[in-house]
Amino acid sequence: MRILAIETSCDETAAAVVEQKTTFGKIKVLSSVVATSLELHIQTGGVVPEVAAREQLTYMLPTIHEALEKARFNKDALDGIAVTQGPGLIGSLLVGVETAKALALTWHKPLIAVNHLLGHLLVNWVREGELPLFPAMGLVVSGGHTDLVWLNSPTDYRWIGGTRDDAAGECFDKCARILLNAPYPGGPAISQAALQVVGPVLPFLPRPMLHDPGLEMSFSGLKTAVYNLVRSIKTVDATYKATVAYDLEQAISDVLIKKTNSAIEHYKPASLLVGGGVVANAVFRDRLSTLENELNLPVFYPPLTYCSDNAVMVGSAGLMTRNVVQPQLLKADPSLGF
Ligand code: KG4
Ligand code: ZN
C-alpha cells in the first residue's frame, strides 16, 4: 500500500509519500516535504494560529505537488490519502483536512483519518532492522502533549498517564523565553546553552512529582522555579544561564525517564515507542538508550528528522491503522486525544 500523507496540525505544512508492503511491516519513505512558517512567528515568540493557517493555505498545494514529484508518482499510483484529523489548531487542521477530502473525492481514493499523537509513535516503523512489537508502551513528548499510552495494537490503545498541566516541550519553550529570551521552539536554544557547561552540576531545580506513585507528571512548577530563579538574581550571566539550562534538561529527563520506567515495570510491554519534538533532545536520547540497556527492552525513537512534526509520521499511522473514513463525514478535531 502506498499513500500520500498530509500534516497541518500546527505551523508546518507537510506532505509525504510512504509505502508499506506487508501488514505492520517496515515503512519506506518515498518523499517528505515540510514547509514551515516559523520565521513569521519569531517576532511574537510563538505560533499565531490565524497567521499559521493563512500561510498553510498558500503552501498546501505546492507542498503536495512537490511530494508527488519527489516520489516520482502521479496520483494514479496512490492507494489512499492520509491526513491529520487532530489534535492541533483548528484553522491549521482545516487546511489539511479539507484539502485531503477534496483530493480523495476527485481522485477517487480512500481517505484515512490520523491521530497526530499516534503518528509520533508509529513513525517508528520507518526503520531498517528489527521492528517494534505489540503490546507496546508509548511515550509522546511534544510541544502540546506529554502522554504515556498503552498499545495492544495500532488501533487498540488507551491513555495511562501523562502531564496534568504543561507539556514537557511547553516547559522547554517557556523556560527558553524566560532564561534566554529565545523564540519558539525553545528546546534547541536550551540544549545549545547547556552545552557551555563545564564540570558537574548538582541538581538544584525541582523534579516535580518524581517520587509520587502513579504515572502523573507536572511541568508547570519547573517553569515557575526557573522564573523565580532568574528574577531573584541581579545579573544573570551566560555561565548562570548555561547552568540552569543544563539542569532543566536533566530535570525534565529525570521525570520522563522515571515515569516511563514505572509504567514499563507495571505493564511489561514488548517494546517502548517514543516520539515527539522533545525526543530531538540529545540528553533525553542518551537517557533513553541507557534505559534500554537497564531494562533490556527494545526502545524505539525516530531519527531527528521525524521527531518534530512531519507528514511521514501521518503516513505511518495511516498505513498502520488503515482508518478509512467517508470524506463527507470527516471533521477536523482540535482536541482529539488518545
Ligand atoms: O512534536 P512537535 O514538533 O510539535 C508538537 O506536536 O507539539 O514538538 C515541538 C516541541 C517544542 O516544544 C520544542 O521546543 C521541542 O519540541 N523541541 C525540543 C528540541 N527540539 C524541539 N525540546 C528539547 N530539546 C530539543 N532539542
Ligand atoms: Zn507533534
Image (cartoon, rainbow, N blue to C red):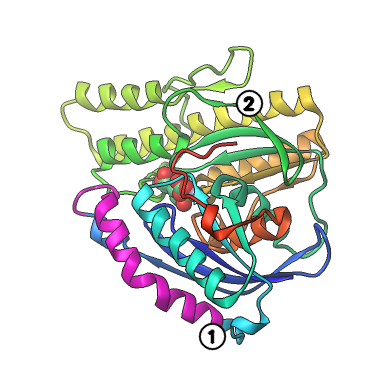
Check disc 2: other Cα within 10 Å, few if <14, some if 14-19, many if 20+.
some
Quadrant in which the N terminus is drawn: bottom right
Q: How many marks?
A: 2
Q: Which residue is mark 1?
A: 69
Q: Is residue 217 left or right of residue 1?
A: left
Residue 68 screen position, x and y as percent: 55, 81
Whether 84 is drawn above or below 99: the answer is above
Q: x%, y% of residue 138?
A: 67, 39
Q: Return the residue nearer the eye: 308 or 285.
A: 308
Q: Which residue is mark 2?
A: 258
* For residue 138, side relative to residue 90 (left or right): right
For badge 2, the amino acid type reads Lys
Nearer to us in this view, 239 or 158 = 158
Residue at left offset 41%, top offset 41%: 197
Contact between marks 2 and 1 (CB within 8 A): the answer is: no
Q: Which residue appears farthest toward the front when viewing the image?
A: 328
Identity of the residue drawn at 43% across and 25% down: 165
Quote the CA–CA distance across marks 2 and 1: 45 Å
Magenta residues, start to end: 43-68
Q: Residue at x 67, y 82 (%)?
A: 77
Question: In the rendering, at what x and y percent does residue 261 appear?
Answer: 70, 28
Which one is nearer the viewer's eye here, 110 or 265?
Answer: 110
Q: Secondary structure at mark 1?
A: helix
Q: Is 224 colored magenta in this rendering?
A: no
The reply, left or right, for residue 178 in relation to residue 332 is left
Q: Is residue 108 above or below residue 137?
A: below
Element at label 2: helix
**The C terminus is located in which quarter?**
top right
